[in-house]
Image: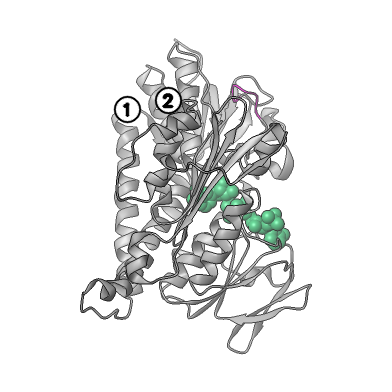
């Protein structure tokens, strides 16, 4: 019998931690997991899931508006925020329950409490001391407030899910995933939205064509864009909150939603007592095997600040449990991870951008821009962009990018092809499904340009 209370203790009951705990228990390990706030973590409670439900709600409004062009005599009525919030919260509660049951069924001991380190093998959990041979830190991240006067007046993403009504006018600050998704869904639900960000285009790091198409799509949705703006202060003003920028912009709205990035959730964990070193902004650097500076303590998910996406955390948590307890050592790959931004319409990508591919060698670029069939009828200005980045020498498709209806759904399948190493010729000999937008990915025959090399 081990000298420890548990073979594995997981700190954090989010997607990554729960998967790791469950799989380790399935391999026969004695596992415990502690969660201080809500089972399922950010994604289930104040992230992907409630956000996507609100995106659906916004899209229904759009569909109702378009329906008349297809012959339906419908009138888009007012939106009932409270009804949406109730449906959203009920679904989140259902998923919470599933997460708890999954752990129970797997034989994992649950602690509804905060866990902090006492020493490298001992944790204090809800007033109790427990020991573990191995520990996984999966505490995730939290939204960051910018260091400007009045920053406390802004809403963070968590706050958005407890609002009692749709703000009539909203300023969204930031140009990343969260800023764009919230700007788009709030606009879709009827708010007036100003988006303030410091780059010339939103989504720094994404493909340039996609960034341009995104800016155009946001404008077409009726969002007012304010690029190249650095926030200076927030203050109370008549009629709401005023945001001013160093460039001289001054806007007033009922609410300001701050979406300027997230920070690892490591403060107060007692990492120093366990001898774990932290990196930039408090993240926990890890080896390729997810080990921290203590070889028996591991970290997974957003706390490692690598690729902060739920499916990446679950894939890595699963591989870690298999490695430690399943006699099948393996690492989850974070190459070619597909990702989507759930704006209206959404954007999605997998693999390299044109700019990254060009740095590696000569690449062929294929681009299609078109109005999808739905919008040739609806007459909505919702255009689609599709783009393939192909290595000239190996013929492999290195990257795919899309902005348009169903981009996320389409990109998942394209990602399988790219992960499998498909060439442009493999795409070309694949028969399309007609009539779809997705078929465009297998019918792009004319090169738009050659770059790199
Ligand atoms: P991102 O890192 O995506 O974007 C942060 C944004 O804030 C950038 O536009 C950045 O600008 C800006 N910013 C940072 N600091 C400041 C500052 N001091 N003043 C003004 N602007 C600033 O973070 P998010 O918070 O949007 O999302 C966090 C992570 O969560 C994402 O990176 C993603 O991994 C994940 N996520 C994934 C989603 C999905 O898969 N659909 C949805 C939501 C989140 P700049 O570019 O100039 O640095």
Asked if residue 283 shows in the view, the reply is: no
Q: Position of residue 295 (x, y in %)?
A: 64, 19
Quadrant for the N terminus in the image: top left
Q: Position of residue 356 (x, y in %)?
A: 67, 39
In which of the image's four quarters is ligand 1 placed?
bottom right
In the image: residue 78, left or right of residue 113: left
Give 405 or 53, whichever is nearer the viewer. 405
Tell me what residue is drawn at x 40 percent, y 56 percent: 405
Q: Position of residue 134 (x, y in %)?
A: 54, 21
Q: Callout 2: helix, strand or loop?
A: strand
Q: Callout 1: helix, strand or loop?
A: loop
Q: Which residue is mark 1?
A: 106
Q: CA distance from mark 2 to mark 1?
A: 9 Å
Mark found first going from the N terminus, 2 or 1: 2
Tell me what residue is drawn at x 59 percent, y 42 percent: 365
Q: Which residue is mark 2?
A: 31
Label 2 close to label 1 by CB (< 8 Å): yes
Which of the two marks, 2 or 1, is nearer to us in this view? Answer: 1
Say if 358 sits above or below 180 in the image: above
On whether residue 401 falls in the magenta region, the answer is no
Say if 38 sits above or below 31 in the image: below
Quadrant for the C terminus in the image: top right
Give 300 or 66, whichever is nearer the viewer. 66
Q: Which residues are magenta?
A: 286-290
């Amino acid at each position: 019998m081990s000298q420890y209370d548990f073979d594995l203790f997981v700190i954090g009951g989010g997607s990554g931690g729960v998967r790791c705990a469950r799989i380790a228990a399935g391999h026969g390990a004695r596992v415990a997991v502690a969660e201080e706030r809500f089972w399922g973590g950010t994604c289930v409670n104040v992230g992907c899931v409630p956000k996507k439900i609100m995106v659906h709600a916004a899209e229904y409004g759009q569909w109702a508006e378009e329906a008349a062009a297809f012959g339906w005599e419908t009138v888009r009525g007012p939106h009932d925020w409270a009804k949406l919030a109730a449906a959203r919260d009920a679904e989140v509660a259902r998923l919470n329950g599933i997460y708890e049951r999954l752990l129970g069924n797997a034989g994992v001991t649950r602690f509804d409490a905060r866990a902090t380190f006492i020493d490298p093998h001992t944790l204090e959990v809800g007033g109790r001391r427990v020991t573990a041979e191995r520990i996984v830190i999966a505490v995730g991240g939290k939204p960051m407030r910018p260091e400007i006067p009045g920053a406390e007046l802004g809403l963070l993403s968590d706050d958005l899910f407890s609002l009692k009504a749709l703000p009539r006018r909203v300023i969204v600050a930031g140009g990343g995933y969260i800023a764009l998704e919230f700007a788009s869904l709030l606009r879709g639900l009827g708010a007036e939205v100003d988006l303030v960000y410091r780059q010339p285009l939103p989504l720094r790091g994404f493909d340039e064509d996609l960034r341009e198409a995104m800016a155009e799509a946001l404008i077409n949705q009726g969002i007012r864009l304010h690029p190249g703006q650095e926030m200076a202060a927030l203050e109370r003003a008549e009629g709401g909150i005023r945001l001013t920028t160093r460039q001289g912009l001054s806007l007033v709205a009922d609410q300001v939603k701050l979406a300027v990035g997230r920070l690892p959730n490591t403060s107060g964990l007692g990492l120093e007592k366990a001898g774990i070193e932290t990196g930039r902004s408090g993240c926990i650097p890890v080896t390729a095997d997810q080990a921290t500076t203590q070889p028996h303590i591991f970290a997974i998910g957003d706390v490692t600040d690598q690729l902060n996406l739920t499916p990446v955390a679950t894939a890595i948590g699963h591989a870690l449990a298999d490695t430690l307890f399943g006699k099948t050592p393996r690492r989850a790959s974070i190459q070619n991870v597909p990702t989507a931004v759930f704006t209206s319409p959404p954007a999605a990508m997998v693999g390299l951008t044109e700019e990254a591919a060009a740095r590696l060698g000569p690449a062929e670029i294929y681009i299609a821009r078109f109005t999808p069939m739905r919008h040739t009828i609806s007459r909505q200005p919702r255009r689609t962009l599709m783009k393939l980045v192909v290595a000239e020498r190996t013929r492999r498709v290195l990257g795919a990018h899309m902005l348009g209806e169903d981009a996320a759904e389409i990109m998942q399948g394209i990602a399988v092809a790219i992960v499998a190493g498909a060439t442009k010729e493999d795409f070309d000999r694949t028969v399309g499904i007609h009539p779809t937008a997705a078929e465009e990915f297998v019918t792009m025959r004319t090169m738009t340009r050659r770059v790199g090399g």
